[in-house]
Image (cartoon, rainbow, N blue to C red):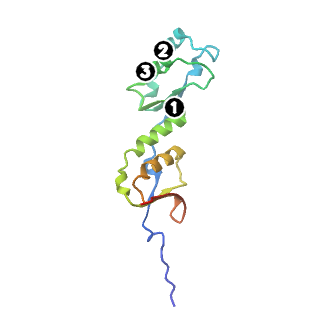
Amino acid sequence: MEEIFVNKVANSGLITLNLEDYFPQGERRFIDIKDVLFMGMVLKEKDFRDWVKNHDWATYTGTNVAIGCTADAIVPTWAYMLMASKLSGIAAELVFGDLQALEAVLWRKALGGIDINEYKDQKMVIKGCGDLPVTAAAYAEITRLLTPVAKSIMYGEPCSTVPVFKSKA
């Protein structure tokens, strides 16, 4: 008697969403104000304004930029505003914070383009391991987006998932 194999995964109705398909493109750069502070601690307005005036902002053309300060220093808000004014229209994306904050913004923007209604009442598997560095922020964002519409959300691979969310409806 011939044994019949049934592909339970294929018959499960699970929809796999691979976040790598939405991976935000572009170079990421961080501009650390600490590099232009006097003694690494104090922002001198004249020196800072000279740095802003003479800095080659064109090197950031088309890149994704985070601006911040890793030193334990008090940096006036206007300093970040001054940098943002120079990067406006040059950088593809600009955020205040570190590279992790930049990634969160890039993922929110990339995943915001998904038509979430396609996944209404669906059993979703958000693919886990891959080749690209998909951040925890991306997984949190897709979960935030899918929770109002999906029947269930799981993490991993269709053959081995971790339950994340199940609709009460």
Amino acid carrying label 3: it is Lys
Of marks 3 and 2, the one in the foreground: 3
Amino acid carrying label 1: it is Arg
Query: For mark 2, what is the residue?
Result: 54
Where residue 161 appears, as percent x and y from the top left, is: 54, 61
Amino acid carrying label 2: it is Asn
Would residue 145 be found to the left or right of residue 134 on screen?
A: left
Query: For mark 3, what is the residue?
Result: 86
Decide: marks 3, 2 in contact (CB < 8 A)?
A: no
Pointer 2 local density, CA inside 10 Å: few below 14, some 14–19, many at least 20: few
- Residue at the (43%, 21%) spot, across then down: 86
Where residue 34 appears, as percent x and y from the top left, is: 59, 21
Where residue 123 appears, as percent x and y from the top left, is: 44, 62
Q: Give the alpha-carbon distance from disc 1 to disc 3, as whole Å.
A: 15 Å
Most foreground residue, 144 or 54: 144
Mark 1 or 3, nearer chain start: 1
**What element does badge 2 sit on?**
helix
The residue furthest right is 39
Residue 47: quarter of image: top right
Most foreground residue, 157 or 120: 120
Q: Give the alpha-carbon distance from disc 2 to disc 1, as whole Å.
A: 19 Å
- Determine whether 152 is above or below 23 in the image: below
Mark 2 or 1, nearer chain start: 1
Most foreground residue, 59 or 29: 29
- Determine whether 45 is above or below 123 in the image: above
Pointer 1 local density, CA inside 10 Å: few below 14, some 14–19, many at least 20: some
Residue 135 appears anywhere in the view: no
- Residue at the (51%, 85%) spot, across then down: 3
Decide: marks 1, 3 in contact (CB < 8 A)?
A: no
**What element does badge 1 sit on?**
strand
Q: In the image, which disc is placed on residue 29?
A: 1
